[in-house]
């Protein structure tokens, strides 16, 4: 594994090793790596001459200081995982100073309205922070392909928009959600759950699967009502939102249309830990 914590060193190294037509695959992460991240790296390794993984807990995308403070930071074990997956992977794990160069603030982005839905409503400023850091990382690494998990489906849509609007020459590749054996979507935040909470969190994916079944015969409003009532009966889980939305615009479904693809999105709190998930309703 090749480790860099300074962007100038990383850029110099990439310049030295890359020939003109070499594909560079990039997997941006905030660390606390799990199987989901590793599967993105595997995908990148298969399709690119070199793979770069970044590990950086980006402060500007956290709207909640407590969430930032408690976000798991496990650099050493992350590096071990990367090394055992493939020793050729290049890691960029900067501190805020190196990547923000003394100005740790977000730029403001227009994502044609995608930013006003779901996560955007509940996490003000979040997608400006994501856009700021991802654009910086793309400028440093210049990847051919960049890999993002579908657990953050709205983030994936926003990154595609960012790239299109700013004409950044990178292919954005979305990869399917990895789940624990009880169906819970893999997430770095799962590390903060107790064993009991982790078991019980199976309710989230179970609810999504039932919602999918119900949506074949019921309206979006009826399904949403059922999900809300299901969570009202739960002791340790609080539903922040459940929405059925158009996969392309992320606008809430009011009346089903045959030529649209819908997806159900959910955000749930357990003991102040925020978990999100989604499912295609096709
Ligand atoms: O999905 C994440 O882990 C983060 O939002 C990302 C894309 C690494 C940007 O900080």
Image (spheres, rainbow, N blue to C red):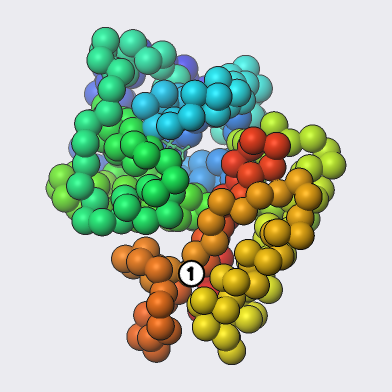
- Decide: is 188 above or below 55: below
Q: How many marks?
A: 1
Residue under the image location 24 percent in, 51 percent down = 111
Q: Quadrant of residue 195?
A: top right
Ligand 1's image quarter is: top left
Residue under the image location 34 percent in, 36 percent down = 125
Q: Which residue is mark 1?
A: 244
Q: Does the residue tagged 1 have its C-beta within 8 Å of any atom of ligand 1?
A: no
The answer to whether residue 258 of the structure is visible from this angle is yes
Name the one closer to the observer, 221 or 194: 221
Residue farthest toward the right in the current orientation of the protein: 196
Horizontally, residue 141 falls left or right of residue 123, namely left
Name the one closer to the observer, 46 or 122: 122
Residue under the image location 51 percent in, 41 percent down = 41
Horizontally, residue 269 falls left or right of residue 263, namely right
Mark 1 residue crowding within 10 angstroms, few (<14) / some (14–19) / many (20+): many
Q: Position of residue 64 (x, y in %)?
A: 48, 29
Q: Position of residue 196 (x, y in %)?
A: 84, 42
Q: Secondary structure at mark 1?
A: strand
Q: Quadrant of residue 141?
A: top left
Q: Position of residue 154 (x, y in %)?
A: 41, 54
Q: Position of residue 61 (x, y in %)?
A: 39, 32
- Decide: is 45 above or below 225: above
Horizontally, residue 6 falls left or right of residue 216, namely left
- Decide: is 60 above or below 109: above
Q: Quadrant of residue 166?
A: top left
The answer to whether residue 46 of the structure is visible from this angle is no
Name the one closer to the observer, 252 or 58: 252
- Decide: is 160 above or below 24: below
Residue under the image location 39 percent in, 88 percent down = 258
């Amino acid at each position: 594994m090749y480790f860099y914590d300074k962007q100038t060193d990383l850029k110099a190294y990439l310049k030295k090793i890359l020939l003109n037509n070499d594909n560079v695959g990039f997997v941006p992460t905030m660390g606390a790596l799990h199987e989901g991240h590793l599967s993105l790296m595997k995908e990148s390794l298969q399709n690119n001459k070199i793979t770069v993984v970044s590990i950086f807990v980006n402060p500007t995308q956290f709207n909640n200081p407590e969430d930032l403070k408690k976000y798991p930071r496990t650099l050493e074990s992350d590096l071990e995982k990367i090394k055992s997956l493939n020793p050729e992977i290049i890691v960029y794990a900067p501190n805020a100073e190196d990547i923000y160069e003394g100005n740790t603030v977000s730029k403001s982005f227009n994502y044609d309205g995608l930013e006003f839905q779901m996560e955007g409503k509940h996490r003000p400023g979040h997608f400006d922070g994501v856009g700021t850091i991802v654009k910086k990382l793309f400028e440093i690494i210049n990847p051919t392909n960049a890999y993002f998990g579908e657990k953050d489906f709205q983030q994936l849509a926003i990154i595609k928009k960012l790239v299109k609007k700013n004409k950044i020459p990178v292919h954005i590749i979305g990869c399917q959600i990895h789940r624990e054996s009880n169906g819970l979507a893999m997430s770095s935040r799962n590390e903060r759950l107790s064993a009991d909470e982790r078991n019980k969190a199976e309710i989230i994916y179970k609810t999504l699967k039932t919602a999918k079944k119900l949506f074949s015969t019921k309206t979006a409003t009826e399904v949403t009502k059922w999900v809300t009532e299901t969570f009202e009966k739960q002791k340790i889980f609080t539903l922040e939102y459940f929405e059925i939305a158009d996969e392309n615009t992320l606008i809430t479904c009011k009346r089903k249309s045959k030529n649209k693809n819908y997806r159900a999105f959910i955000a749930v709190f357990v003991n102040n830990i925020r978990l999100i998930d989604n499912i295609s309703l096709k």
